[in-house]
């Protein structure tokens, strides 16, 4: 049985590092501080054209909750169509209602649209803030969603092992439970003991740029972020995770 390591990527550099570390899939996003939003079509197309790796495209029009207006849902549909036309392998989204449950109507429409382009569908970690995770999972299975990214409704997947184990039993192979959230090469063991075939990591490290800054009081973004530094995929840590998952296969 093959195993998949998915890496959350925000830039060209991230994708290159994830690929060189042996990752099998990248989840392509924009806006790291928001936890991931929809990336540009240019970045999607570049990855598909240049990197031989499965691509999952985040479909999320903004940060914050997963309760969307009619207009935001219309944008999500357009983004799914763009990802499908460009040749993405899968798309990642979730729509909740104001009470914290899955919003079945909009989810059904988005799933059908993605499937019309023969893409797989993943539900992202909005699940981890939802009510009644067992009911939520049954509904995802009924909609034909392919996988669920979850930390077991805890801050990290290692802390959520108990619920992850229960979700795997409920899914019973009808949907892939993909642990994610604080997954690193140093804390994998409890997750490797689960009956999983996929794992997700956003492992990153700080890299200082080589650019000389002359106007130190001017910021390109928020002043809480140092423009002379950037977070990039931690190539060595991803390689450790890939090695551990491949060993699980054997």
Image (cartoon, helix red, strand yellow):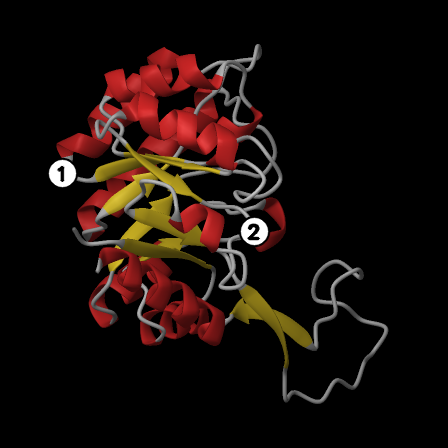
**Residue 161 left/right relative to 168:** right
At which x and y percent is residue 16? 37, 74
- Percent from the top left, x then y, of residue 148? 37, 34
Classify mark 1: helix, strand or loop.
Answer: loop
Q: Closer to the camera, 211 or 27?
A: 27
Residue 193 point in image, percent of width and height: 39, 46
Circle 1 sits on which residue? Answer: 118
Q: What residue is rendered at 36% in x and 63% in y?
A: 244
Residue 209, visible in the rendered structure: yes
* Residue name at image x 22 percent, y 38 percent: 120
Q: Position of residue 204 (x, y in %)?
A: 55, 65
Q: Nearer the viewer, residue 107 or 146?
A: 146
Q: Secondary structure at mark 2?
A: loop
Numbered label attached to residue 108? none
Q: Quadrant of the C terminus?
A: bottom left
Please tell me in which quadrant of the rendered image residue 47 appears: bottom left
Rendered residue at 31%/40% (across/down): 195
Can the viewer see residue 29 in this picture? no
Instruction: Between residue 68 and residue 10, name the one nearer to us.
Output: 10
Query: Where 132 falls versus 236 (above or below)?
Result: above
Query: Pointer 1: residues within 10 angstroms few (<14), some, or many (20+)?
Result: some
| First of labels 1, 2 by sequence position | 1
**Residue located beneath label 2 in the image:** 182
Q: Residue furthest right?
A: 217
Residue 71 is left or right of residue 227, and the answer is left
Callout 2 crowding tier (Cα within 10 Å): few <14, some 14–19, many ≥20: some
């Amino acid at each position: 049985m093959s195993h998949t390591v998915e890496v959350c990527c925000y830039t060209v550099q991230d994708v290159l590092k994830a690929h060189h570390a042996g990752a099998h899939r990248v989840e392509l996003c924009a806006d790291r501080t928001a936890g991931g939003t929809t990336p540009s079509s240019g970045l999607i197309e570049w990855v598909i054209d240049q990197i031989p790796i499965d691509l999952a495209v985040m479909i999320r029009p903004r940060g914050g909750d997963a309760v969307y207006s009619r207009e935001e849902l219309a944008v999500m549909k357009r983004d799914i169509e763009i990802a499908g036309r460009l040749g993405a392998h899968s798309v990642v989204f979730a729509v909740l209602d104001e009470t914290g449950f899955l919003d079945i109507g909009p989810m059904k429409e988005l799933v059908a649209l993605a499937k019309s382009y023969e893409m797989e569908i993943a539900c992202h970690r909005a699940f981890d803030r939802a009510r009644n995770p067992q009911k939520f999972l049954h509904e995802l299975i009924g909609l034909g969603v392919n996988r669920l990214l979850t930390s077991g409704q805890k801050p990290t997947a290692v802390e959520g092992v108990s619920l992850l184990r229960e979700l795997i039993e409920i899914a019973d192979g009808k949907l892939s439970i993909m642990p994610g959230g604080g997954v690193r090469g140093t804390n994998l063991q409890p997750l490797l003991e689960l009956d999983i075939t996929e794992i997700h990591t956003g492992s990153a490290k700080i890299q200082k740029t080589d650019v000389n800054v002359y106007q130190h009081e001017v910021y390109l973004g928020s002043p809480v972020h140092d423009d002379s530094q950037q977070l990039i995929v931690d190539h060595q840590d991803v390689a450790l995770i890939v090695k551990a998952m491949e060993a699980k296969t054997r």
